Amino acid sequence: MAIPVDQLSHPAVRTLVTAINANDRQAFAAALTPSATMSDDGSDRDLQQWADKEIFSSNGHMDIESESDDGLSLVADYRNDTWGAMRTRWQFMVDDGKVSRFETGQA
């Protein structure tokens, strides 16, 4: 059974996932530190280019399966119009209440 986004433990992660699922670019940017970074399947990517392709232009959406590490690690069914649905893992690092880095990949 999926965990409702509004019940995720970590506030910074909850804010970022809410922005992703709402397809809200402004809220997504506001949830990140100015120098935030990310990786996908172990390769660092340009966060803005990746987010545009994998989230915003393709209707990305996360259904959270589980969380661990005080809410900083998630397993989610992630779907978008490009790739369909896949089971993914997400690891977040938070600095001053905002996400400073996230790493994602297939679970």
Image: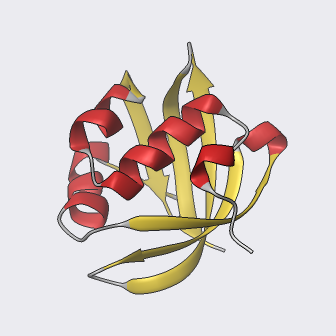
Residue at the far bottom: name it. Answer: 84
Q: In this view of the protein, which residue sits in the foreground, 105 or 58?
A: 58
Residue 64 at what x, y percent from top left?
A: 63, 64
**Quarter the C terminus occupies:** bottom right
Residue at the far left: name it. Answer: 57
Residue 73 at what x, y percent from top left?
A: 71, 50
Taking 32 as reference, is 28 above or below it?
below
Q: Residue 11 is drawn in which quadrant?
A: top right
Relative to 54, 107 lies left or right = right
Q: Residue at x 55, y 51 (%)?
A: 103
Residue at the far right: name it. Answer: 69
Q: Residue at x 56, y 18 (%)?
A: 97
Q: Residue at x 23, y 71 (%)?
A: 58
Q: Residue at x 34, y 39 (%)?
A: 28
Residue 95 at what x, y percent from top left?
A: 57, 18
Q: How many marks?
A: 0
